[in-house]
Structure formats: structure tokens, C-alpha cells
Image (cartoon, rainbow, N blue to C red):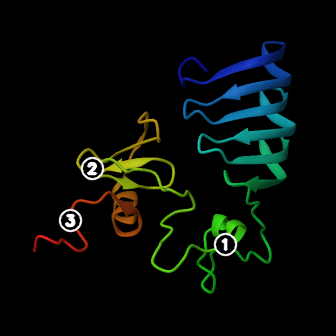
């Protein structure tokens, strides 16, 4: 764990993680639950830095069943998923709280949306800076370097900070 930047708080047996415990990854994701022979085993929850979580039942480190809940409380459904499909592009918070009046757009599920640093993109788990090709979390801690594929996807898909003036200008 010292080499990967991970940590563990909990019970041990024969020098291995065993029983109830909390395992923290260097990405700030953490697992809280049962361990056996150094692996996730039994009931446990993965908590992600963005506020979402995965509650599951694990066998020898592999999830056998579980459910994913987004940070806003929306639970993922593998079948009959009606959220944000080709026919309904509403955000979950719009479904819960209703649509805004005409002329007021909701750009993300967060309202108001995150402020994106100049020249950067919001890629869902943090900010991408195209000059450095680095993705940081929303508190500006390093997450990863973007490869060519991820860079292309971010630049073509994700919301970017404004880098040009738009809208009506009474001086012109």
C-alpha cells in the first residue's frame, strides 16, 4: 500500500486485511466494508470523490451484485433506464425540481454549474487542461494524464470554459 499511496484502517488476520475495514485509494475513492484474505469480500460500499457510490456484495475482490447511485441520488437501473436517453434529455434535477422558464438553460445536473478554469474543460470527474493534457479533480488535485483518445473525446464532447465574448453588447 505504501508504494501505491493507498491506506487501510481495520482488522487484520495473519498480516492481511480481514473483517470490517476502510480501504482508501490514492484517487480518494474509498471502500468501507468486509474484507477477507486481503480482498473485498462480503458487503461493502465504494464511495467516489464526486459523491456517488456503489453498494455491493463482493467475492474475492469481484463485485457479484450491487447498485450504483449518482451523487444527486439517482439510482442506476440496468433495465428500463429512462434517464437522459434519446427521447428525454433532461437532467435528473430537472425531473425532480421541474424545468426552468423559457430562456433559462440548465447546463449541467448541478445548478448553478461548476465554474470551469479558463481554457479548461469539465470532463465529469474533474477539469482537463488541454495545454498540459492533465486532468485534476474539482479541488485541483492530479488525477491522470489524458491519452490521445480521452483528449479527443473531452475536446469534442465536454463543456468548456468561455474563451470568447458572446451575447448582446449595447456598445456595438
Q: What is the crowding at mark 2: few (fewer than 14 residues within 10 Å), some, or many (at least 20)?
A: few
156 or 139, which lies in front? Answer: 139
Q: Please name the residue that numbered disc 2 is placed on.
A: 118
**What is the C-alpha distance between the residues marked 2 and 1?**
31 Å
For the N terminus, the image quarter is: top right
Query: Residue at 77% across / 60% down in the picture?
Result: 75
Query: Residue at 40% across / 58% down in the picture?
Result: 150
Which residue sits furthest front?
170
Residue 50 horizontal/vertical position (percent):
59, 45
Residue at disc 3, secondary structure:
loop
The disc at residue 48 is: none
Marks 3,2: beta carbons within 8 A: no
The disc at residue 98 is: 1
Describe residue 63's horizontal placement relative to residue 122 as left or right.
right
Question: Is residue 151 shown above or below 83?
Answer: above
Residue 117 horizontal/vertical position (percent):
32, 47
| Residue 170 appears in the figure | yes
116 or 82, which lies in front? Answer: 116
Describe residue 158's horizontal placement relative to residue 80 as left or right.
left
Q: Please name the residue that numbered disc 3 is placed on.
A: 165
**What is the C-alpha distance between the residues marked 3 and 2?**
13 Å
Amino acid at each position: 500500500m505504501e508504494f501505491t499511496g493507498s491506506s487501510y484502517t481495520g482488522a487484520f488476520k495473519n498480516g492481511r486485511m480481514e473483517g470490517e475495514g476502510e480501504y482508501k485509494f490514492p484517487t480518494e475513492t474509498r471502500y468501507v466494508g468486509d474484507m477477507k484474505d486481503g480482498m473485498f469480500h462480503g458487503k461493502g460500499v465504494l464511495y467516489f470523490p464526486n459523491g456517488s457510490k456503489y453498494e455491493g456484495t463482493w467475492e474475492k475482490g469481484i463485485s457479484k451484485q450491487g447498485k450504483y447511485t449518482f451523487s444527486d441520488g439517482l439510482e442506476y437501473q440496468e433495465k428500463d433506464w429512462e434517464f437522459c436517453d434519446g427521447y428525454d434529455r433532461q437532467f435528473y434535477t430537472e425531473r425532480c425540481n421541474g424545468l426552468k422558464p423559457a430562456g433559462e438553460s440548465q447546463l449541467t445536473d448541478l445548478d448553478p454549474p461548476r465554474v470551469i478554469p479558463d481554457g479548461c474543460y469539465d470532463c465529469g470527474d474533474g477539469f482537463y487542461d488541454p495545454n498540459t493534457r492533465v486532468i485534476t479533480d474539482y479541488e485541483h488535485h492530479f488525477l491522470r494524464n489524458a491519452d490521445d483518445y480521452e483528449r479527443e473525446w473531452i475536446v469534442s464532447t465536454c463543456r468548456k470554459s468561455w474563451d470568447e465574448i458572446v451575447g448582446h453588447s449595447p456598445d456595438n
